[in-house]
Amino acid sequence: MDAEAAVREFYACYFEGRPDDLERCVSEDYTDHGHTPPGRGPAGVRADYDQAVAKVGGLVAYVIDALVVDDDEVAAVWTGTLPDGGSMRGLSLYRVREGLIASTHHTLLAS
């Protein structure tokens, strides 16, 4: 899987409510720098997912507004619609290795 496909599948797992599939999207040494503590490895991505869903009270419907790919690096600007109808925008940076996401950094953008 190329870098773009890996990131798109990662988002699909989130908004389609497929947390078990998330574990197949990341490398064994995956680190998510957008959570405290950082999610690490396949178990960490599942814990991050569970934490995020619990925090907002359900699934977030993500739309990728822009995607820039440079070899193994991907930048995604996204909008997430919360279960209560509110929304948030963010920027996520991904490093992909051998078709799996190895690391990610996230930040929320001002509305």
Image (cartoon, rainbow, N blue to C red):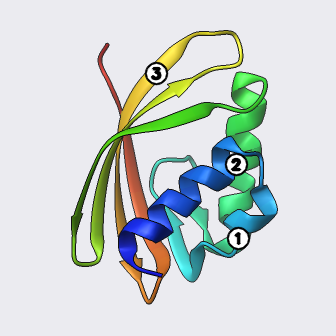
Residue 57 locus on image (x, y percent)? 78, 23
Q: CA distance from mark 2 to mark 3?
A: 17 Å
Image position of 51 (left or right of 4): right
Contact, mark 1 vs mark 2 (Cβ under 8 Å): no
Nearer-N-terminus badge (1/2): 1
Q: Earlier in the sequence, mark 1 or mark 3?
A: 1
Left or right: where 99 falls relative to 105: right
Kindly identify which residue carries mark 3.
88
Question: Which residue: 38% across, 73% down?
Answer: 3
How many angstroms separate mark 1 from mark 3 (CA)?
25 Å
Q: Give x and y (percent) for residue 107.
A: 36, 38
Q: Residue tagged by mark 2?
A: 49
Question: Amino acid type of disc 1?
Answer: Glu
Q: Is residue 18 visible?
A: yes
Estimate the spatial distance between the alpha carbons at disc 1 and disc 2, rounded to whole Å.
Answer: 10 Å
| Element carrying mark 3 | strand
Where, quadrant-wise, is the C terminus in this rendering?
top left
Q: How many numbered circles are shown?
A: 3
Residue type at numbered disc 3: Met
> How many residues crowd mark 1 within 10 Å: few (<14), some (14–19), many (20+)?
many
Disc 2 marks a residue whose amino acid type is: Tyr
Q: Are marks 1 and 3 in contact (CB under 8 Å)?
A: no
* Residue at 46% over, 21% down: 88
In terms of secondary structure, where does tag 1 sit? Answer: loop
30 relative to 7, above or below: below
Please say if the residues under marks 2 and 3 sit with CB atoms less than 8 Å apart: no
Q: Earlier in the sequence, mark 2 or mark 3?
A: 2
Q: What residue is shown with label 1?
A: 23
Name the residue: 70% across, 70% down.
23
**Label 2: few (<14), some (14–19) or many (≥20) C-alpha neighbours in 10 Å:** many
